[in-house]
């Protein structure tokens, strides 16, 4: 028989748009894994989804498993064969257990001994039968970011399951799941379609098309895109496509019809970000621009349906949007009346973290930390004024109506309102910028004040949380401490801030918390935890840069405190590993490190005991290199640092060639070990070379 | 369609679906969910179908009758069905037709919205139902109530009556809604809105309110000790409303706030547990033979 197509459709109540793609990918992975595990071969797999269904169609699935010969090893011959040469009780028992008789047993050698083997011809089972039994377990194994129960059921699923389609070619696969038995009847659009029978798996899309459902995700996405393009063309508009919004809208409709509405031109006086946020975040509308990128008083919404009564739908949406914009304008006007100082004062009534005072306290610490940086970074004059003023008022927009209504406009509104209130351009910019980077992969802030406030804001938040004993665990990170720490690292990865080591910043932040009476545990303890936590973020940064694992291990020494230097070192090592002589360098350092461990800690070098020329040469080279290395280190010149220590390599090898370290005389031995300890100490300031792995 | 007819149509519709038509509760509530017809009855294994209008007090939303959309007290049409029927979405959409809303002429969508009321230890998953972009109903499958797992799961439908009416009547300002011919929403509610707002923000006596909170809390605990869940729960509602008044007055500092919420939550949880225990003691009288066992 020819192969058939396997179609599975899970009909559910409307799924959250944000979970559809992930769930679909998971369904595909688990379904194919199941086929593989059951030795059922297949062709191409396609997936489909609308808000009400997750589907997969696997092409060219074989009719059944192939037959296989199976052999199971039983007891050894000496046990299996009795004194009379016939089968023993043990052999009979073994055969019975396998569902066979002794006639199916054979003797064969296995690892030098003869055993009894049961031989069995296992007939492959029909795919249809296997699917009927197996699909429920595949569906049960799906996991979702949020799942729920419904009715009387114990089962959890993304949303209630209402129908199932299981079709193997033309034949129904009647499996049951969530109290529903699969058939060949699907459901169309809620209002424009009805129930429909799918005669054969191949006709899935066309059957649903007749029921007003566009089941292919990409086709739906492209349909929306081209409808937007038509509107652009017809109206002479520009409709910028936010891909995240398009993705969401695609998963909110089963059949899309883009339509436009308008709003009162007077609302265009509101900041563009307010208009865009209202339309996009709250209503899932696409804003409309003119050719020059200026917002126009129109919006596009994508309806889940056809072109029937589009006017009425447009009027309804216009009414909703205009109520929202009226609110926004009210907020905007009220906010304008709010003095910045009053707004800052109100922050004293907003909780920061439970048990850690208010945002007001947090802002005062950011200000104090900013002052503490002035000298170290040599910030004076206007730059100083900008930094301190921006620090004082960086969170003031948190007291405005607008930000309370639209939290995603934090900083953006701060900038608008600060400018209106006559703050300098630099201060206004720093208020907006200090929220960057807002997520992994986001850009760093621009401008010194924005950068430093961003850094101190995040640093203080993480330090404060740690001082309370709040740390992320597993997937739980309610205060986004990982994101904040990653933000700190991202900023410090810029060599411009190489004077700000993590260790220095931790001390600074913990000092401030202590001064203000918020430090709940010994600073040393908290600092240790912070160091370990940030080291994990550094590791993540190096991994993102594509640095090899062994090099990461070699570089993260437990006190890697300058992210920009760390990155430079990683780059230097990445170049060096490509060179032929690098292996020799590492071998020299590793050998020195391994032997150095054999000596007691803190051995000192006695010049007079240096007998051989090679050891005197080594000491001289260490001294010279050490001095030069320290000077390069001060300038954070990773290339130079490596050059200096690599000069030691040939000398170390000569030393090992000519000198026996483990001399019988303990004084001489210890003296030589002391030399090696010095080398290890020096090169470890660059990296723990012995962690670097070479392919053998 | 005037507001009175909207209510009558919804009542008649849900009555036909087998719901008990109950009345609004006579103790102040912040939402239909807090009415014991929902909060307590959604607990335990007994089936329960009910519908009622709940005038819901949100003191902090008081605007002296001046804001076109925000009010001290709004009205919810609340439906609870336990266990949630398999065709509940279709039934809900039928109810919109009963209000004269033809789905073919509108854009109706179920947009993810997960509901949570931490003070009552309640949480659920579901949607906001959008009618041409406007949220007209909150549609929730209860997963937890009073800190207890909802089993079986109830579905809760909460229609925002003012919103729905302003859409149906095409009014921008809710005070202009027609309640019944010749009587507007404003005729009925404008004065109480003003007075409640003035009382909440200017006249209420925080010392008294604090004292009452303590007394209501004590009384709730005393009733719980006596296994009297319904009287106990009334005092929990009073605690909750008193807290809302204090909160709106700005009398509760940020640091105290979680403490007060925690006290209400603790009482609500105790009532929830007690309710299930008392129903069990009574042999779950509404659990009919057969039929209701776990699938």
Image (cartoon, coloured by chain):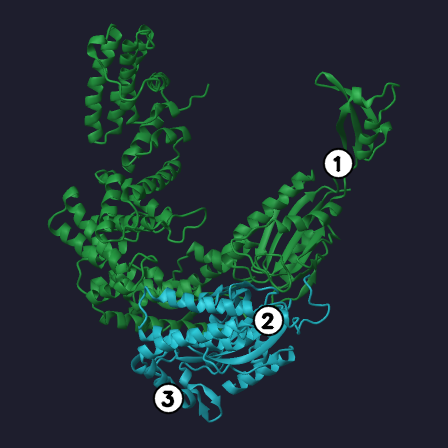
Chain colours: A green, B cyan
User: What residue is disc 3 on?
Assistant: B191
Residue tagged 2: B278
Give the quadrant of residue B96: bottom right
Label 3 element class = helix
Q: Which quadrant, please, contains the C terminus of chain B?
A: bottom right
Asked whether A658 or A261 is in front, the reply is A658
**Image position of A286 (left or right of B290):** left
- Whether residue A633 appears in this view of the structure is yes
Outermost residue to the bottom:
B182
**Depth check: A294 or B162 in front?**
B162
In front: label 1 or label 2 = 2
Element on which disc 1 rests = loop
Question: Does the residue at mark 3 contact the one at mark 2 (Cβ under 8 Å)?
Answer: no
SS of the residue under disc 2: helix
Q: In the drawing, does residue A642 fall left or right of residue B1?
A: left
Distance Cα–Cα, label 1 vs label 3: 82 Å
Q: Is residue A215 left or right of residue A329?
A: right
Residue B246: give x, y in percent of width and height.
Answer: 35, 75
- Closer to us: A332 or A555: A555
Tell me the residue at 53%/50% (across/down): A22
Up the image or down, B152 lies above or below A170; here it is below
Tag 3 subunit? B
Location of residue A112 in the rendering, given as x and y in whole percent from the top left corner: 72, 16
Q: Chain of mark 2?
A: B
The alpha-carbon separation of the residues under discs 3 and 2 comes to: 42 Å
Residue under label 1, please give it. A66
The vertical placement of B23 against A575, above or below, is below
Q: Same chain, marks 1 and 2?
A: no
Residue A485 in the image, given as x and y percentages of width and height = 33, 46
How far apart are the two marked residues, 1 and 2, measured between alpha carbons? 61 Å
> Which circle, 1 or 3, is nearer the viewer?
3
């Amino acid at each position: 028989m020819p192969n058939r197509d396997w179609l599975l459709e899970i009909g559910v109540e409307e799924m959250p748009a944000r979970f559809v793609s992930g769930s679909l990918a998971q369904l595909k992975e688990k379904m194919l894994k199941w086929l593989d595990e059951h030795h059922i071969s297949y062709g191409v797999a396609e997936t489909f989804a609308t808000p009400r269904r997750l589907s997969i169609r696997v092409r060219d699935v074989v009719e059944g498993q192939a037959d296989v010969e199976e052999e199971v090893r039983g007891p050894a011959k000496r046990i299996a064969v009795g004194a009379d040469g016939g089968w023993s009780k043990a052999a009979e028992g073994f055969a019975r257990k396998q569902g066979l008789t002794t006639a199916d047993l054979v003797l064969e050698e296995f690892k030098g001994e003869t055993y009894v083997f049961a031989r069995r011809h296992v007939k492959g089972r029909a795919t249809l039968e296997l699917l009927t039994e197996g699909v429920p377990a595949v569906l049960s194994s799906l996991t979702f970011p949020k799942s729920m129960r419904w009715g009387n059921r114990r089962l959890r699923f993304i949303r209630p399951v209402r129908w199932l389609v299981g079709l193997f070619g033309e034949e129904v696969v009647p499996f049951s799941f969530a109290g529903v038995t699969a058939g060949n009847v699907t459901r169309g659009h809620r209002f424009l379609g009805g129930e429909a029978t799918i005669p054969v798996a191949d006709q899935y899309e066309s059957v649903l098309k007749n029921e007003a459902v566009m089941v292919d995700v990409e086709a739906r996405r492209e349909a929306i895109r081209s409808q937007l393009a038509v509107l652009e063309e017809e109206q002479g508009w520009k409709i910028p496509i936010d891909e995240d919004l398009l993705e969401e809208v695609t998963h909110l409709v089963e059949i899309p019809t883009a339509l436009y509405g308008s709003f009162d031109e007077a609302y265009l006086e509101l900041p563009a970000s307010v208009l865009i946020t209202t339309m996009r975040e709250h209503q899932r509308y696409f804003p409309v621009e003119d050719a020059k990128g200026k917002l126009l008083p129109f919006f596009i919404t994508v309806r889940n349906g056809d072109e029937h009564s589009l006017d009425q739908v447009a009027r309804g949406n216009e009414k909703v949007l205009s109520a929202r914009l009226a609110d926004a304008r009210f907020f905007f006007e009220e906010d304008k009346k709010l003095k910045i100082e009053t707004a800052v004062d109100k922050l004293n009534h907003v909780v920061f973290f439970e048990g850690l005072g208010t945002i007001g306290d947090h802002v005062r610490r950011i200000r104090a930390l900013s002052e503490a940086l002035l000298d170290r970074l040599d910030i004076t004059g206007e730059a100083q004024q900008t930094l301190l003023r921006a620090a004082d008022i960086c969170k003031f927009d948190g007291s405005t109506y607008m930000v309370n209504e639209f939290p995603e406009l934090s900083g953006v509104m701060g900038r608008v309102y600060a400018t209106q209130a006559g703050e300098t351009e630099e201060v206004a910019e720093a208020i907006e910028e200090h929220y960057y980077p807002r997520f992994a992969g986001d850009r760093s802030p621009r401008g010194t004040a924005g950068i430093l406030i961003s850094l101190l804001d995040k640093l203080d938040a993480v330090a404060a949380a740690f001082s309370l004993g709040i740390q992320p665990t597993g997937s739980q990170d309610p205060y986004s401490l990982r994101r904040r720490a990653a933000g700190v690292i991202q900023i410090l990865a810029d060599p411009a801030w190489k004077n700000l080591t993590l260790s220095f910043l931790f001390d600074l932040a913990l000092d401030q918390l202590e001064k203000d009476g918020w430090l709940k545990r010994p600073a040393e303890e908290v600092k240790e935890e912070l160091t370990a936590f940030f080291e994990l973020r550094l590791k993540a940064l190096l991994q993102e840069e594509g640095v090899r694992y062994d090099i990461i291990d070699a570089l993260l020494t437990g006190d890697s405190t300058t992210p920009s230097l760390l990155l430079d070192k990683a780059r230097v090592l990445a170049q060096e590993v490509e060179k032929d002589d690098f292996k020799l360098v590492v071998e020299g350092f590793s050998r020195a490190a391994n032997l150095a461990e054999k000596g007691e800690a803190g051995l000192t070098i006695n010049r007079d005991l240096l007998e051989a020329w090679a050891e005197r040469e080594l000491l001289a080279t260490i001294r010279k290199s050490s001095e030069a290395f320290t000077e390069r280190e001060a300038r954070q010149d990773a290339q130079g640092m490596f050059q200096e220590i690599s000069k030691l390599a040939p000398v170390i090898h000569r030393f090992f060639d000519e000198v026996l370290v483990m001399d019988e005389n303990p004084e001489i031995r210890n003296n030589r070990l002391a030399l090696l300890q010095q080398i290890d100490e020096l090169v470890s300031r660059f990296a723990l070379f012995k962690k670097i792995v070479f392919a053998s | 369609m005037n507001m009175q007819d909207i209510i009558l149509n919804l009542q008649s519709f849900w009555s036909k679906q087998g719901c008990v038509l109950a009345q609004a509760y006579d103790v102040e509530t912040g939402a239909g969910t807090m009415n014991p017809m929902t909060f307590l009855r959604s607990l335990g294994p007994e089936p329960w179908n009910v519908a009622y209008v709940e005038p819901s007090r949100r003191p902090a939303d008081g605007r002296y009758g001046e804001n076109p959309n925000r009010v001290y007290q709004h009205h919810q049409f609340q439906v609870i069905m336990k266990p949630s029927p398999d065709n509940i979405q279709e039934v809900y959409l039928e109810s919109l037709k009963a209000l004269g809303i033809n789905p073919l002429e509108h854009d109706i969508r179920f947009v993810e919205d997960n509901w949570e009321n931490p003070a009552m230890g309640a949480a659920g998953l579901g949607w906001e139902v959008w009618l041409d972009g406007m949220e007209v109903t909150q549609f929730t499958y209860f997963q937890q109530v009073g800190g207890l797992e909802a089993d079986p799961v109830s579905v809760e439908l909460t229609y925002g009556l003012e919103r729905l009416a302003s859409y149906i009547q095409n009014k921008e300002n809710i005070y202009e809604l027609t309640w019944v011919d010749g009587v507007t929403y404003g005729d009925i509610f404008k004065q109480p809105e003003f007075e409640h707002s003035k009382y909440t923000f200017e006249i209420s006596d925080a010392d008294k309110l604090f004292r009452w909170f303590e007394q209501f809390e004590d009384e709730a605990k005393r009733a719980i000790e006596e296994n009297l869940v319904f009287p106990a729960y009334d005092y929990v509602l009073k605690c909750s409303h008193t807290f809302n008044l204090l909160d709106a007055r700005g009398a509760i500092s940020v640091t105290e706030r979680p403490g007060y919420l925690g006290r209400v939550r603790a009482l609500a949880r105790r009532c929830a547990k007690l309710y299930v225990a008392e129903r069990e003691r009574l042999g779950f009288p509404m659990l009919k033979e057969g039929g209701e066992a776990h699938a």
